Image (spheres, grey):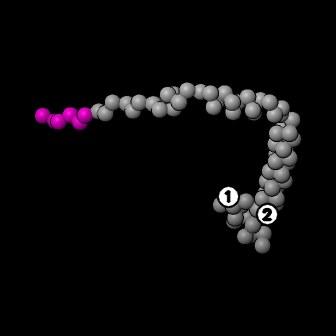
Amino acid sequence: EERVAKALNKMGVPSSQDIDALVQRIDALSQRMVGTRAARPATKTAARKTAAARAPRKAAAKVAPAKRTARKAA
């Protein structure tokens, strides 16, 4: 088992311990994100949505750049 583990480690395959450590980090980050979202005031989000709704629609419809024509080789 040790030889297989060493060979896998040399090839860069993560061990089950590495995966478990990553899962714990992801869980911790997820908990921090939940706390961050709860700490934000709701008025900022509502203000952003309202401002986006008032934005002119012309900005969204951009004009396509001019097409380049192919040059013929002489």
Front label number (1 vs 2): 2
**Quarter in which the C terminus is drawn:** top left
Residue at the image position 25 percent from the left and 34 percent from the top: 69
Q: Amino acid at mark 1?
A: Gly
**Vertical placement of 40 versus 32: above or below?**
above
Q: Is residue 47 left or right of residue 71?
A: right
Magenta span: 69-74
User: CA gap, disc 1 to disc 2?
Assistant: 13 Å
**Vertical placement of 21 versus 51: above or below?**
below
Residue lying at the far left of the rendered structure? 74
Residue lying at the far bottom of the rendered structure? 1
Residue at the image position 81 percent from the left and 42 percent from the top: 33
**Quarter in which the N terminus is drawn:** bottom right
Crowdedness of circle 1 by 10 Å Cα count: few (<14), some, many (20+)? few
In-front residue for pair 14/62: 62
Residue at image mark 1: 12
In-front residue for pair 20/60: 60
Q: Is residue 68 left or right of residue 63?
A: left
Place of residue 49 in the rendered image (x, y in percent of width and height, measured from the top left): 69, 33
Q: Amino acid at mark 2?
A: Ser
Q: Which mark is residue 16?
A: 2
Q: How many marks?
A: 2
